[in-house]
Amino acid sequence: MSFLPLISGREVISALEKIGYGVDHQRGSHVVLRHGDPPHRRLTVPDHNEVAKGTLRAIIRQAGLTVEEFKTLL
């Protein structure tokens, strides 16, 4: 298993925007991102100072990335 950095929700959103995700809406402290290509993938990212490692790993998996690919986007 690869090492996951401690990053904020805003940094996660910034990295995912580089691969085509855009902010759809926000409800409370959770930001919903959508991908432009069909089928419309939807990801929910908590807008916290530190995203929990398990949550971050799940977001990376749902985006169809590996941990190494995600790290290059940071």
Image (cartoon, rainbow, N blue to C red):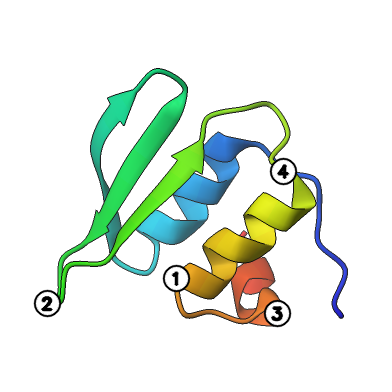
Query: Quadrant location of residue 60?
Result: bottom right
Give the residue displayed 31% in from the left and 49% down from the top: 33
Residue 73 in view (yes/no): no
Mark 4 Cα shell of 10 Å, populated few (<14), some (14-19), many (≥20): some
Q: Which mark is residue 38?
A: 2
Asked if labels 3 and 4 touch by Cβ distance under 8 angstroms, the answer is no
Give the Cα distance between marks 4 and 3. 15 Å
Residue that badge 4 annotates:
7
Q: CA distance from mark 2 to mark 3?
A: 25 Å
Give the CA separation, mark 1 to mark 4. Answer: 17 Å
Percent of width and height locating residue 69: 61, 79
For mark 1, give the secondary structure. loop
Give the labeled residue for mark 3.
Answer: 68
Residue at 65% across, 51% down: 55
Tag 4 secondary structure: loop
Q: Amino acid at mark 1?
A: Ala
The Cα–Cα distance between marks 2 and 1, rounded to whole angstroms, is 14 Å
Considering every residue shown, the one lying at the far top of the view is 28
In front: 57, or 16?
57
Q: Do the residues bearing badges 2 and 3 touch, measured as CB atoms within 8 Å?
A: no
1 vs 4, front mark:
1
Residue 22 at x, y percent in the picture: 26, 51
Q: How far is mark 2 from mark 4, CA to CA?
A: 29 Å
57 sits left or right of 29 in the view? right
Task: Please give the residue where the numbered disc 1 appears in the rendered image.
Answer: 63
Query: Which mark lies nearer to you, 3 or 1?
Result: 1
Q: Note whether 57 is above or below 56 in the view shown.
A: below
Q: Residue flagged by tag 2: what amino acid is it?
A: Pro
Q: Amino acid at mark 3?
A: Glu
